[in-house]
Amino acid sequence: MVDTPASANRERLVANLARVAKGDQAALRAVYDTTAAKLFGVCLRISGDREAAEDILQKVYLKVWDRAGRFDAERASPITWLCAIARNTAIDWRRANGSTAHLPESAAAIVEDDSPLAPEVIDAATQRARIFDCLDALDERPRHAIRAAFFDGLTYSQLAEAMAVPLGTLKSWVRRGLIQLKGCLDDA
Amino acid sequence: MPEPIIPEERDALAAELALGLLEGEERALAMRLRLSDPDFAATVDAWGKRFEPLCAGFEEQPSPALWPAIEHRLGGPGERDSHRALRRWRIGAIASGALAASLAAVLVLRPAPAPVEIVRAPDRTVIAQLGSGDAPGLLAASYDPAGGVLRIRAVRLPDSKLAPELWVIPADGVPRSLGLVAADGVTRVVVDAPHRALLSDGATLAITFEPHDGAPHKAPSSAPIAAGKISTI
């Protein structure tokens, strides 16, 4: 896999986050410019509301500003780290706004959505296709549960309640699904 | 929960932690394992990477006004709420590019808040300060839920042929008119029953300039010149 552009982008992002940790506002702007669309997409997916997503996104970058010093480039990819902040902030919003009841449906709609790919990194597009294909290959119930866990931030017990199945049953679906997912991703 | 020993179970546990499925004692155990076992920690990170493309699948451009808003908030604490109200307003109610540009200027130029004007009031009264030190408009509002009466004092408003109209914007982001108010001095606004419930903690009050005719209007036609969040005291 040729990943030169992706790794160059990553290095730049890591360097910018290090500058953000020292209080460099221009560096935060650079981080924003390269990641806002991606993180906004995450916020929008989870909140389901454009206006809320913009509020959430503001909070996300304020958190990045406060926490950049805690980012450890040895341990995590900067995008994974940023996505985790976006996802958690959006999930907090979602919980605070008490809209968990219909979440599994929103998660179900996710794969059907064929939003255009970012043109920049073909590698990312390939990965995206792969994880979506692998999710699609799962049985409906584990697929549904894994998506809802990721996009809606539901825990096992919340999922069991939302899907009206016993906790043990749900766990065994999800674990089987995760093992299958890994096999699919590693094989591809 | 017994220590997972089968590799597949450890792997599933790492995935569960990465996805945030665990809670309570299960989560605590998995977190401890992550701290104490570098292999397990690496497995959790590997799962994070596997899920990462899900993050990148839905890129969408946020409003161009968002960065100025963030930059403003980096500038110093305070005025976050009225600032947010302004931005919300821009997205919800303003289609015109010129208006958007003028509001963006407001966002950028809006200075740190001036000392808050304290409105002394009895318990459960709702207060809000609309605008801040050097903003074009500055108003103070207090609301007595018992009588359903809102008193709003215009401390400073720019000259205009139009009339200041007061809006309440609850959590749904849709402005509702509470009617026109005086451009100076105190206006006593009797809030009608359907709108009373909207005057709660966290809702925003805002002022726009509107034509005298047809008030209260269904929706604002211009950017707010002052806005502030309600707090219950």
Image (cartoon, coloured by chain):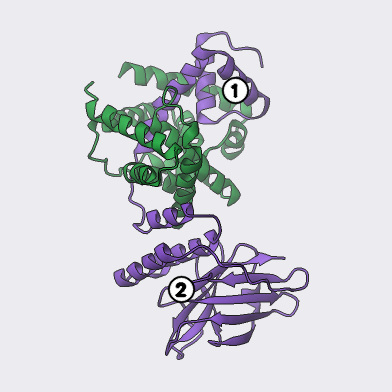
Chain colours: A green, B purple
Nearest the viewer among B18 and A177 is B18
On the image, numbered disc 1 is attached to which residue? B31
Nearest the viewer among B208 and A101 is B208
Q: Is residue A41 left or right of residue B168?
A: left
B153 to A162, vertically: above or below: below
Amino acid at pointer 2: Pro
* Residue pictured at 46% horizontal, 41% vertical: A64
- Per the rendering, the mark at residue B224 is 2
Amino acid at pointer 1: Met
Q: Position of residue A105 (x, y in %)?
A: 48, 44
* Residue pictured at 58% horizontal, 39% vertical: A162
Q: Is residue B140 visible?
A: yes
Neighbour tally class for label 2: few under 14, some 14-19, many 20 plus, Cα within 10 Å: many
Nearest the viewer among B180 and B226 is B226
> Do circles 1 and 2 both sit on a common chain?
yes
Q: Is residue B121 left or right of residue A118?
A: right
Q: Chain of mark 1?
A: B
Q: Position of residue A169 (x, y in %)?
A: 59, 25
A138 to A108, vertically: above or below: above
